[in-house]
Image (tube, helix red, strand yellow):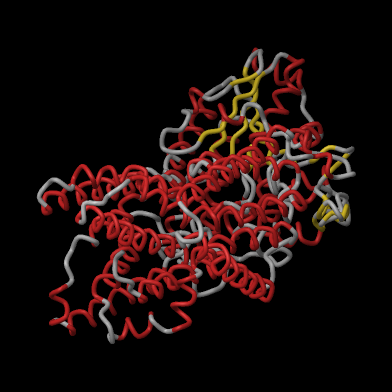
Amino acid sequence: MIEYRKEIDGLRAVAVLPVLFFHAGFSGFSGGYVGVDIFFVISGFLITSILAKDLADGRFSIINFYERRARRIIPALSFMLLSTTIFAYLLLSPIDLREYSQSLISVTTFVSNIFFYLESGYFAGAAEEMPLLHTWSLAVEEQYYLFFPPLLWLLWKLPKNLMLLVLIVFSGLSLALSEILTANHQIEANFYLIFSRAWELFAGSILAFIPRDWLTKQRFAATTLSSLGLVMVGFSIVMFDNHTPFPSLYALVPVVGSVLIIYFTLPDTFVWRLLTLPFMVGIGLISYSLYLWHQPIYAFIRVGTIGNPAFAIFIVAIVASALLAYLSWRYIERPFRTKGRFNRKEIFGWSLASIAGFLLVGFVGHFNNGFGQRFNTPNYSATIQHSPKREDCHTIGANYLKPADACQYFSGPLTWAVMGDSHVSEPVYELATRLKPYHQSVVQLSFSGCPPALLFTHDEPGCNSWTREAVNYITNNNDIQNVLIGYRYTSYLFGYQQKSYPELPNQGPVSMHEYASGELGLQQARELYWQSFEQIIEKLVTAGKQVYLLYPIPELPADIKKITSPKSVFNADLLLPVNQATTTEYYVSRNRLALEKLDVLAKKYHLQKVEPFKVLCNETGCPSIINGKVLYFDDNHLSLWGSKLLVDSIEIDHDASVKNNKG
């Protein structure tokens, strides 16, 4: 065995605590997610140190290696999965339980990072409410240890300098890929997949081959550089946030910081004294189980809460996580890691049985569609429908669908265009359905998350050029007589509503370059947004188009699946009444600026108003369901049913459209 260094357990505490605080939303830990990167470096260093010693002693064995991994990973993971699955059955909606079952399959096969990558996007549930989301990092580690031990065994026969060079090259290629994915805004792939994360584990692996003997005579250097490493880690935890491109070159800060701490921390240096405090070592010892338990507990709390849970609730959750982590470490981790208690055959046998059991549970949950029969209440999931054209016709990214190639449907001459962000994707489908009997068609021009960026720069690749091309396409096409245009105005200018509800968020348009760079202040940035939107309207009107102005769509305080599902199998009550999921006061207050600006534009340019609030809501508030069908497919996008009600309210002169098109 390699020498035990208790300061590394202390570093594990530095890794896990910021993760817990970040996921709880505590201020001062906006970059707490870098704790995972610290774990990657520690893991690469320790596992490679063990492998290198085995190779040097001539007793390297793949079977021994995977036995150690099974002892370390599977018992505590199985305990958490068993407990979490029981609570998931009791608390989650049918749709969410089906998704949980799928994630359970991915966890037991160590591909959950791939699963969550593929599931990211509009139709995934709220990430913070996914009990097993955190297991993506375990999957990355296990995928690394599928190829790294054989690779090291092959490289071991090379001169050590050449072996290190090969590892450095692999690490550099992985980092380069991460930076390429960052530049191309492949955020989910960059975050979840092994190819862009491996360099962090390689950093620890490389460190394992660099001798430390000389450090004993260089205590000043050791003290200084280990302290610098701690500062780098602390800086990234405090200063990074959700808008930091990550992982990318920015990840070098916590990764290099961790490398400096591991390499240069000698006994009795400042960093050593800090990391070897009993509290830090104790947290480090239970850090694996603590990491395993915190996310399910947080997720189930959020599932039962509208808005963000209170600070005190998260404190209780952290204490509960720590208690369960200690019990898991004391009565599961330690016994299973002791060879005298369980031999190799028993470890592999229990591991295979556990994997098989959870796979079976996962498949049963998937094929039973989340056990909807658990609840003796109406099941609205069948009406949570988005546009069947969304995947093919709604565009995003630098390689966007060109307006000239945009989807036109259903049949007949082109008379309508619908332009905007994702909020128009379902209304355009229902509009096309309404026009179909009149043999008229509509072209869908929608770009995900793209504001009316004609006069300002939006950070989503392709958004600005697409906006210009879409406006030019409409204005230059004489067949198009009518244009429905709409955006999620308030969210872009003030921020998302879910976490702050019922309070109103008041952040700036962080995706607007002019604001994010400090070139414009908050009010100037918001005004520029409306100037840009007005210029689009002016161009359309000048081109002779009849413009239908889509007003803000009422937003829900939580996802529709959450709102329409019972609190548990023991409590049939809903979190919110379906006839008033949000109040009129909230809608008016949140959208006050947008309503004022749109009213001015409608009057100035003689536009037709399309007002979802007047169609879907009443004097007291907005429902989530009308006539037994849901109005949304998440918390802010209308479902096909909600869109149909909205489109049916639009006054359309079908004969005039056809005549103008022929004329």
The residue that appears at 24% across and 61% down in the rendered structure is: 208
| Residue 501 occupies quadrant | bottom right
Residue 556 locus on image (x, y percent) = 74, 52
Q: Quadrant of the N terminus?
A: bottom left
The residue that appears at 28% across and 87% down in the rendered structure is: 268
Residue 397 locus on image (x, y percent) = 45, 38
Residue 20 locus on image (x, y percent) = 54, 68
Side of 266 where 67 appears, left or right = right
The reply to whether residue 375 is visible in this rendering is: yes
| Residue 574 occupies quadrant | bottom right
The residue that appears at 29% across and 70% down in the rendered structure is: 3
Side of 595 where 191 appears, left or right = left
Residue 596 locus on image (x, y percent) = 69, 56
Side of 386 where 325 appears, left or right = left
Considering depth in this image, is 561 or 54 the residue closer to the camera?
54
The reply to whether residue 523 is visible in this rendering is: no
Considering depth in this image, is 39 or 342 the residue closer to the camera?
342
